[in-house]
Amino acid sequence: MMLNASELLVVAAIIFVVVGLQKLPQISAAAARLRLSFQKGLADDVIDVSSTSGELDHEEASGESTEPTQTRES
């Protein structure tokens, strides 16, 4: 259900009347923070799909790694 432009204007006018112009910047800032945190959460949940077997190796499933880790010094 998508809203067209005239319906969005009506909704925006109702929000202006109900909320008032003093609180509108605070509400929009809170909505922006919510959107950014949601996008960050989606980016954190990226799944590595490079494995074609469909199963996790034993060390990946247990969280242990037998390979040495390399650190990069600057």
Image (cartoon, rainbow, N blue to C red):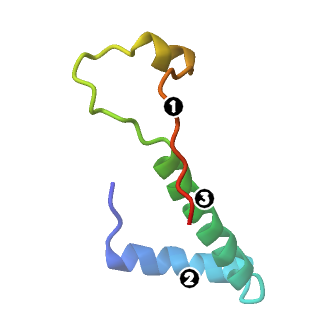
The image shows residue 58 at horizontal and vertical percentages of 45, 10
Q: Amino acid at mark 1?
A: Pro
Secondary structure of the residue carrying tag 1 is loop
Mark seen at residue 68: 1
Q: Secondary structure at mark 3?
A: helix
Dot 1: within a 10 Å radius of its alpha carbon, few (fewer than 14), some, or many (20 or more) residues?
few
Q: Say which label, 1 or 3, has the lower sequence index.
A: 3
**From the image, which quarter does the N terminus lie in?**
bottom left
Q: Amino acid at mark 2?
A: Ala
Residue visible at 48% across and 15% down in the picture:
59
Quadrant position of residue 16: bottom right
The disc label shown at residue 13, or none: 2
Residue extending furthest toward the right: 22
Q: Residue at x 60, y 71 (%)?
A: 32
Q: Residue 48, how many percent across, how many down?
A: 36, 35
Task: Give the label, 1 or 3, closer to the camera.
Answer: 1
> Which image quarter is the C terminus in?
bottom right
31 or 21: which is nearer to us? 31
In this image, 70 relative to 26: left or right? left
Disc 3 target residue? 37
Give the number of the mark in front: 2 or 1: 1
The foreground one among 26 and 41 is 41
Q: Earlier in the sequence, mark 2 or mark 1?
A: 2
Q: Position of residue 61 (x, y in %)?
A: 49, 15
Image point (71%, 89%), residue name: 21
Distance in Å between CA atoms under marks 3 and 2: 27 Å
